[in-house]
Image (cartoon, rainbow, N blue to C red):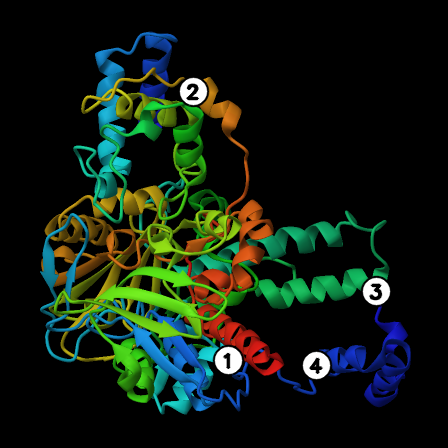
């Protein structure tokens, strides 16, 4: 809970346009925790398996696309809609869109909220066990 | 509920009635529902005969691919399987001494468990109703043993609960006894005091109270004071000491409620988790070996598919073999069992709608770790033989004690089984860091847990090449739009695998999907 509050506080502090170092640190931490195992800590991905995020047109393009991808998953990528809240997704995407030479506008949690469909995914937290 | 309408009607006359109103289909359904045991289409493979030497290339020597190859070749088809790995089985793997795994972006692990010890880091259990999987374990003479999927004496660990029971291991059976006893007492007393007088007849109230007394082990004055089923502080035995022993004292109902540990209980297990559950003796990969014994001669190992082309005459697959040499293979049809997470990145010739559908599913992130323990302290110190320790830490969720090798010297247990974002997090750790994480969690449940760990083997399926995920996770939307597209052939390309079933993540899903697709292919060949 503490962690979520910190992130929300960071979002409040930075407002809509400014991306501060505090939020950048949170974004990096969220990235390392949730994304780096596949996309690698430096965002270069693994050829043939996990797309590079550094220098990626998709990452730096219309924010709707990366937001939707994080929310709903695609191909080998899981859906994070049940795992990360709107502020966390905005924070991590803002980091990804500004790290490793990427230059794209920050993402705010309202953008994430607007695209959250609330669709139910099979097996998601349905029970303690699966398979 | 009122079943009076069915009273006095014999099964036979009831069935005749069904037949007269609904024809034979309704009759068949009725017979199945009444337990006459007409097998569903999924319990046995389709009978294919007269394949006439048509050529089929199967992509992937997992359970689905080998099922397709086995049944098609029995039916007279000429089958070749292309397999990227140097071994057959797909996700049906068992890690034992010498088994190697290099996750993408990770270091190479070589399993160094003692001889005879193993972990099923992929599929690990077979419910009794997966008759398709059981069809092949029988066909290939694979001995089964019971997988202990429920153990009243095992622990539940709710760190995030409230009250005095939170954060400490409690016996599942004691939680069950106390929460059911407590709930039964309250309900029984309420009924007795007239709370439901308007809702129920006097007869029903009496029967309900009788049921609650039975369910909750209540006393005559409707109190729950514990039950011998929740166990003894001093076990009963011979003579006068220990003699009758000393019963345990129930937890306070409020403490049980606040602990949250009751979340591991339900009156009936989810269908996929029901007993009886099995595992092959010696490891799940016995199933892979069983298939391999039958179709191994059809498999080209270490052969990576690069492209798939097709026209109205046939298919052509290009590949690179184990020596790095490029080649092509032509066939009349292709059955592709490559996971969609991998297939979406390959160069295949298919309609735009089909390709879009392939991208329309996400795959589960899944992590498991096997820990070799110096001694079987869960058996020796806690008398727990198999079963799960449920732990509400999302990075752990389940610790599972082995259902094999009881009373042996050592054992390998499952240290965690986590999903989603937690699986992503844990998979970013090195194998040794994962072991340490599992050890820290285990120490909360069992004293001396981490100091008993000798070695470990972990797998993060989303980082495993050729799989890139544990299993397909369809959204409701994907089920409605993409899934039906992929269940039908695109030209001469048929997909099969657990991802094209409603048994995703189970071997039965792969087998039954393969059965369905080869039956379609066979019907087409015969119609031509």
Q: Residue at x 68, y 56 (%)?
A: B188
Expressed as whole percent of the image width and height from the top left, the position of residue B32 reads 70, 81
- Judging depth in this view, the residue of A77 and B61 nearest the camera is B61
Of labels 4 and 1, earlier in sequence is: 4
* Quarter of the rendering containing residue B124: bottom left
- Judging depth in this view, the residue of B242 and A70 nearest the camera is A70
Host chain of mark 3: B
CA distance separating discs 1 and 3: 43 Å
Q: Which one is in front in this view, the residue at disc 1 or the one at disc 3?
A: 1
Q: Which residue is mark 3?
A: B203
Would you place residue B16 above or below residue B245 in this image?
below
Relative to residue B130, is residue A34 drawn left or right?
Answer: left
Q: Which residue is mark 2?
A: A109
Q: Are marks 3 and 2 on the same chain?
A: no
Q: Which residue is mark 1?
A: B131
Would you place residue B108 above or below residue A56 in this image?
below
Confirm or deny contact between disc 2 and disc 1 (CB under 8 A): no
Q: Which quadrant is the C terminus of chain A positioned in?
A: bottom left
Q: Which quadrant is the N terminus of chain A positioned in?
A: top left
Host chain of mark 1: B
Host chain of mark 2: A
Where disc 4 sits, the SS reads helix
Number of numbered tags placed on the structure image: 4
Expressed as whole percent of the image width and height from the top left, the position of residue B304 reads 24, 64
Of labels 3 and 4, earlier in sequence is: 4
Q: Are marks 2 and 4 on the same chain?
A: no
Where disc 2 sits, the SS reads helix
CA distance separating discs 2 and 1: 48 Å
The local crowd at label 2, few if under 14, some if 14 to 19, many if 20 or more residues have their Cα within 10 Å, is some
Where disc 3 sits, the SS reads helix
Q: Which residue is mark 4?
A: B32
């Amino acid at each position: 809970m503490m962690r979520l509050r910190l992130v929300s506080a960071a979002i409040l502090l930075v407002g809509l346009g400014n991306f501060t170092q505090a939020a950048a640190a949170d974004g990096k931490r969220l990235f390392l925790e949730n994304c780096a195992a596949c996309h690698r800590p430096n965002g270069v991905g693994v050829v043939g398996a996990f797309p590079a995020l550094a220098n990626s047109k998709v990452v730096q393009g219309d924010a709707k696309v990366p937001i939707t991808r994080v929310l709903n998953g695609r191909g080998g990528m899981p859906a994070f809609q049940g795992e990360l809240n709107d502020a966390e997704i905005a924070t991590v995407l803002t980091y990804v869109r500004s790290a490793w030479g990427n230059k794209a506008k920050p993402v705010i949690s309202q953008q994430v909220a607007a695209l959250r469909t609330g669709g139910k995914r099979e097996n998601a937290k349905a029970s303690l066990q699966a398979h | 509920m009122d079943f009076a309408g069915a009273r006095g009607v014999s099964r036979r006359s009831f069935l005749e009635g069904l037949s007269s109103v609904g024809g034979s289909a309704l009759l068949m359904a009725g017979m199945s529902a009444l337990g006459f045991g007409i097998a569903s289409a999924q319990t046995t493979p389709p009978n294919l005969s007269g394949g006439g030497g048509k050529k089929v290339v199967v992509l992937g020597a997992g359970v689905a691919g080998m099922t397709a190859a086995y049944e098609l070749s029995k039916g007279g088809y000429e089958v070749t399987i292309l397999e990227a790995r140097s071994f057959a089985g797909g996700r049906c793997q068992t890690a034992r001494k010498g088994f190697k795994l290099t996750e993408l972006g990770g270091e190479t692990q070589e399993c160094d468990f003692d001889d005879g010890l193993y972990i099923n880091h992929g599929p690990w259990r077979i419910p009794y109703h997966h008759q398709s999987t059981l069809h092949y374990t029988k066909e290939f003479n694979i001995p089964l043993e019971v997988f202990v999927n429920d153990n009243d004496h095992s622990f539940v660990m709710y760190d995030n609960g409230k009250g005095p029971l939170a954060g400490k291991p409690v016996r599942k059976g004691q939680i069950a006894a106390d929460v059911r006893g407590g709930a039964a007492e309250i309900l029984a007393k309420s009924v007795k005091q007239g709370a439901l007088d308007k809702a129920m007849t006097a007869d029903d109230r009496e029967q309900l109270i009788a049921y609650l007394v039975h369910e909750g082990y209540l006393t005559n004055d409707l109190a729950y004071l514990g039950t011998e089923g929740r166990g003894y502080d001093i076990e009963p035995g011979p003579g006068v000491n220990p003699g009758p022993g000393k019963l345990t004292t129930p937890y306070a109902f409020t403490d049980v409620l606040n602990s949250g540990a009751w979340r591991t209980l339900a009156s009936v297990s989810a269908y996929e988790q029901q007993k009886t559950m099995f595992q092959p003796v010696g490891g799940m990969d016995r199933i892979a070996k069983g298939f391999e014994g039958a179709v191994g001669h059809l498999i080209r190992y270490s052969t990576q598919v690069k492209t798939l082309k097709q026209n109205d005459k046939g298919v052509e697959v290009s590949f690179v073999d184990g020596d790095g040499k490029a080649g092509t293979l032509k066939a009349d049809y292709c059955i592709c069992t490559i996971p969609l997470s991998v297939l979406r990145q390959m160069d295949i010739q298919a309609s735009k709608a089909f390709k879009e559908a392939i991208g329309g599913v996400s795959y589960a992130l899944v992590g498991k770790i096997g820990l070799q323990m110096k001694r079987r302290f869960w058996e020796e110190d806690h008398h727990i033989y198999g079963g799960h320790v449920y732990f509400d830490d999302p990075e752990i969720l389940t610790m599972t004690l082995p259902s094999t090798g009881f009373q042996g010297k050592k054992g390998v247990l499952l240290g965690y089984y986590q999903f989603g974002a937690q699986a992503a997090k844990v998979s970013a750790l090195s194998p040794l860091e994962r072991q340490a994480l599992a050890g820290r969690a285990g120490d909360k449940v069992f004293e001396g847990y981490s100091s008993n760990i000798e070695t470990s083997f972990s797998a993060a399926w989303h980082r495993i090449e050729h799989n890139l995920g544990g299993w397909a996770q369809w959204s409701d939307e994907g089920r409605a739009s993409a899934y039906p597209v992929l269940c039908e052939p695109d030209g001469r390309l048929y997909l099969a695998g657990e991802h094209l079933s409603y048994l995703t993540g189970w071997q039965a899903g792969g087998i039954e999907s393969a059965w369905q697709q080869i039956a379609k292919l066979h019907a087409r060949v015969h119609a031509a």
